Image (cartoon, grey):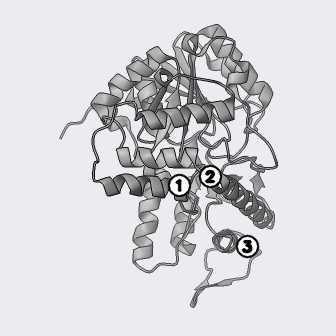
């Protein structure tokens, strides 16, 4: 059986695979703790549910424009004014089946085979695969100073004649760090001068801790939006805990949005009208759920940091936002895949191997779950790998005896 070169080069989404694994184990009655999940546990806003239900009650569920219904475009325009201080037109907006699709159609609209796309490491697992789906070349950049905070000089060193785009994600998945105001200002200016597309993946931008606000890329844009190669990505999945609704969007120059719309029209047509209605309800409705989620995540992160500090030999950078801790476990095992499989087998804790994010020896731990999940999950991990822990552990009524240290 033969497959395309691109088809053979694409790996499955490790995060989605882990969700599937967790569901299978739980269905078997296994006491699984999922510290790998990338979705909040809180409920979708009532305004979103009401809007979707109202439309469903009409029974009039039809096709939508490929780039989104007018009401959603207007909501996104309002969102862009409220959070970025920039007025855009409907022609500058496309709504997609999640922020992932918005990024994907943007890449398909701008990339030719052998073009290069730069992104700082560690990075979201889908960036390299999405670039490869376009026949282009992913170019991860590891900061030379060993931190999770990229510098312009790190990016300049790998930028060449084939560079077509740079992707920036802040707050970052998997590290939770927020890139500095100076860096965002420099990268916006750099891309403008070089004529490079800048994709700002701002999906976590309202989930920042300690009163911080991520840098506003538009603040440093010298050209008008229709003369710019800046592409701003966002969606309802993270900030409104609406991961299953699959509505995201891109804001960019109208010529690019037109090309993206053409691609999307043949790919999936427009997103579901019911889910778009829900997104309108969330964006235009009461915003208290966002602050409630942000507060919960900040508290969960503090608890996880306290638990991790009980280890010897771990290194962790305090997250500035989002809902992840990216922890260096290399003193225990430099092979993150082996370590993740070991923890799943021995103590039924699901984590995500750091190698999937471009940095082996690390595990991504999610703070989306309950305080109980966090404390018990870290307790199980500590018991499994720390020789200073007691030799026995109870998981429910099951007694485990450690025989591997």
Q: Left or right of 306: which side holds 23?
A: left
On the picture, is 159 further left or further right than 24? right
| Mark found first going from the N terminus, 3 or 2 | 2
- Kindly identify the residue that appears in the image at 75 percent across and 62 percent down: 299
* Circle 3 or circle 2, nearest the eye: 2
At numbered mark 3, what does the secondary structure look like: helix, strand or loop? loop
User: Which residue is the site of mark 1?
Assistant: 47
Q: Is residue 135 above or below residue 392?
A: above
Which tag, 1 or 3, sits closer to the chain's start?
Answer: 1
Residue reaching furthest to the bottom: 397
The residue sitting at 74% across, 19% down in the picture is 186
The x, y position of residue 291, in whole percent, is 70, 54
Q: Name the foreground residue: 259 vs 199.
A: 259
Q: Earlier in the sequence, mark 2 or mark 1?
A: 1
Q: Which mark is residue 387?
A: 3
Q: Is residue 198 above or below residue 17?
A: above
**Residue drawn at the location 33% of the way across and 57% of the way down:** 57
Residue 359 at x, y percent in the picture: 62, 43
Does dot 1 land on a helix, a strand or a loop?
helix
- Which residue is disc 2 drawn over? 286
Mark 3: give few (<14), some (14-19) or many (20+) Cα within 10 Å.
few
Q: Is residue 152 visible?
A: no
């Amino acid at each position: 059986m033969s497959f395309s070169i691109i088809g053979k080069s694409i790996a499955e989404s490790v995060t989605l695979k882990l969700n599937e694994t967790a569901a299978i184990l739980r269905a078997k009655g296994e006491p699984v703790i999922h510290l790998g999940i990338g979705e909040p546990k809180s409920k979708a806003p009532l305004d979103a549910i009401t809007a979707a239900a109202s439309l469903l009650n009409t029974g009039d569920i039809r096709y939508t424009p490929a780039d989104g219904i007018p009401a959603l475009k207007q909501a996104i325009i309002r969102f862009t004014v409220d959070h970025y201080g920039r007025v855009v037109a409907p022609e500058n907006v496309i709504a997609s089946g999640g922020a992932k699709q918005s990024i994907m159609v943007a890449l398909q609209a701008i990339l030719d085979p052998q073009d290069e796309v730069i992104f700082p490491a560690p990075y979201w697992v889908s960036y390299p695969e999405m670039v490869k789906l376009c026949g282009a070349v992913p170019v991860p950049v590891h900061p030379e100073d060993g931190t999770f905070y990229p510098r312009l000089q790190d990016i300049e060193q790998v930028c060449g004649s084939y560079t077509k785009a740079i992707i920036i994600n802040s707050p970052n998945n998997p590290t939770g760090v927020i890139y500095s105001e100076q860096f965002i200002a420099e990268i916006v200016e750099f891309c403008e001068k070089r004529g490079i597309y800048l994709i700002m993946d701002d999906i976590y931008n309202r989930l920042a801790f300690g009163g911080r606000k991520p840098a506003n890329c538009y603040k440093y844009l010298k050209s008008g939006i229709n003369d710019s190669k800046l592409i701003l990505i966002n969606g309802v999945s993270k900030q409104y805990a609406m991961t299953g609704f699959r509505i995201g969007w891109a804001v960019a120059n109208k010529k690019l949005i037109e090309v993206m719309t053409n691609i999307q029209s043949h790919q999936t047509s427009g997103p579901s009208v019911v889910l778009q209605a829900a997104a309108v309800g969330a964006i235009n409705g009461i915003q208290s759920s966002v602050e409630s989620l942000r507060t919960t995540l900040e508290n969960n992160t503090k608890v996880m940091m306290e638990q991790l500090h009980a280890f010897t030999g771990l290194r962790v950078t305090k997250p500035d936002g989002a809902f992840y801790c990216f922890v260096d476990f290399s003193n225990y095992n430099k092979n993150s895949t082996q370590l993740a499989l070991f923890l799943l087998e021995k103590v039924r804790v699901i984590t995500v191997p750091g190698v999937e994010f471009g940095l082996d020896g690390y595990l991504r731990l999610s703070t989306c779950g309950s305080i109980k999940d966090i404390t018990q999950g870290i307790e199980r991990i500590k018991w499994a790998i720390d020789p200073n822990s007691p030799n026995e552990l109870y998981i429910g009524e099951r007694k485990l005896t450690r025989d591997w240290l």
